[in-house]
Amino acid sequence: MLRNIPKVLPPDLVKYMMEMGHSDVLIIADANFPGTAHAKRMIRMDGIMIPELLDAVLQLFPLDNFVPNPVRLMRNLPTEPVPEIWKTYEALLKKYDQDGAFTEFEFIDRLPFYEAAENAYVIVQTGDESRYGNIVLQKGVC
């Protein structure tokens, strides 16, 4: 056992986060995301909601402060309301971003988001059914 690693993080995810280098990308995906079709590496966490996982990941994961927006979301349709879950993400990012890398989200349309996912270091697919819950985190340096 190790100390101070949130228990919600499975060993494989901690391993992948340790392997990741500066600018590598981690995607935490909702239940509807086509992860298997796009992932190089994938971890399924069907019983976990994204905010719980994001809270744990951000305790260990520095964001990239060499890019304007190291956190990206899948853009919702203009006819849809702003997803409530994004407010939760913003609060968690502000809580843990020690280097001030996060200022605002970058938004990516659905199909380009899927294409970008193919270059992610790892995708973690959760059981969260929140619409537009997918979040991309670009790793920085400690």
Image (cartoon, helix red, strand yellow):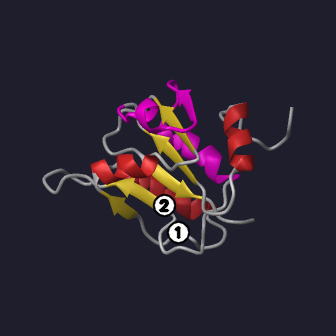
Residue at coordinates 69% horizontally, 42% vertically from top-left? 16
If the image is split into quadrants, where does the C terminus sit?
bottom right
Residue 76 drawn at (x, y percent): 25, 52
Residue 81 drawn at (x, y percent): 21, 52
Residue for badge 2: 71
Q: Is residue 18 above or below residue 13?
A: below
Q: Is residue 8 left or right of residue 108?
A: right
Asked whether 142 or 6 is in front, the reply is 142
Contact between marks 2 and 1 (CB within 8 A): the answer is yes
Q: Does 109 appear in magenta?
A: no
Q: Secondary structure at mark 1?
A: loop
Q: Is residue 127 visible?
A: yes
Residue 34 drawn at (x, y percent): 38, 34
Residue for badge 1: 102
Q: Is residue 40 above or below residue 87?
A: above
Q: Is residue 94 above or below residue 122?
A: below
Q: Residue furthest left?
A: 79
Residue at coordinates 52% horizontally, 24% vertically from top-left? 47
Q: Amino acid at mark 2?
A: Val
Q: Earlier in the sequence, mark 2 or mark 1?
A: 2
Asked whether 94 or 57 is in front, the reply is 57
Q: Badge 1 local density, few (<14 within 10 Å), some, or many (20+)?
A: many
Q: Amino acid at mark 1?
A: Phe
Quarter of the rendering containing residue 31: top left
Q: Secondary structure at mark 2?
A: strand
